[in-house]
Amino acid sequence: MKRVDLIQEDDVYREYMQRNVQAEVDAYCHHDFRHHLDVARITYILILENNDLNYFIKENNLSGKLAAKEVIYAAGLLHDIGKWQEFEGSTDHASAGSHLAREILPRAFFDANEIDIICKGIYEHRNISKDMSFLGERLHRADNLSRLCLECDSQQDCPKMKNRDKTASSFEY
């Protein structure tokens, strides 16, 4: 997955990841590289386990399985890239991440269609809705599944745990 490697090697991507680390000193869940990679892997697994890869390829007019895998991994690696902007109070991280990803993806040779698919998924991943894209919904589910909330020392104070009844279904797949 050469294009995914190019994202990881991109100086701007690395700068934004470092900004996330610096901004999250007191955060409950950290949005570091491990989290991004977990979300990418879980998203891909969800799609494979439900035999949806061919559907995803056809629905999005992708060139094949490798392109689909790279699109999925790119979305996972970039889905929280704008978290530092949210901590600074300037914008929602999903919206910021979608915008910032558009800066990085062309340098990794993603085409305009692929960039639109990835950025839409990033933009949608924060809140579940009936109108979201296939990738946005899978990213949302993977993002929730990637967290080991029940093993966290901050459960008592965590807003995600306080709203668990509202999000319980997102802990299942």
Image: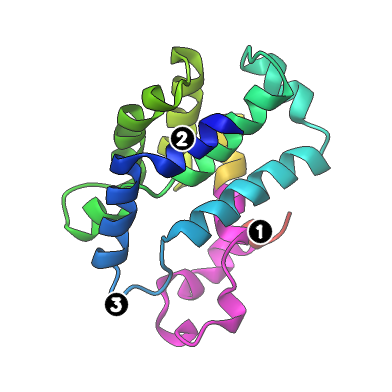
Q: Assign a secondary structure to mark 3.
A: loop
Three-letter amino acid code of the residue under disc 1: Ser
Where residue 103 sits: x, y (%)?
A: 30, 29
What amino acid type should be assigned to the residue bearing mark 3? Asp
Q: Earlier in the sequence, mark 2 or mark 3?
A: 2
Residue 81's place in the image compared with 102, above or below, is below
Residue placed most toward the observer, 56 or 17: 17
Q: Are marks 1 and 3 in contact (CB under 8 Å)?
A: no
Q: Nearer the viewer, residue 44 or 141?
A: 44
Residue 87 placement: quadrant: bottom left
Whole-percent x and y of residue 10? 36, 39
Q: Is residue 144 magenta?
A: yes
Residue hosting label 2: 6
Quarter the N terminus occupies: top right
Q: Position of residue 120 (x, y in %)?
A: 45, 29
Where does residue 111 sit, x and y in percent of width and height?
47, 15
Residue at the spot x=53%, y=36% of the render?
Answer: 4
The residue shown at (65%, 62%) is 171
Secondary element type, mark 2: helix
Disc 2 vs disc 1: which is toward the camera?
2
Q: Viewer-proximal residue, 141 or 106?
A: 106
Q: Residues within 10 Å of mark 1 (few under 14, many from 20)?
A: few
At 83% from the left and 34% from the top, the residue drawn is 51
> Which residue was labeled with disc 3?
26
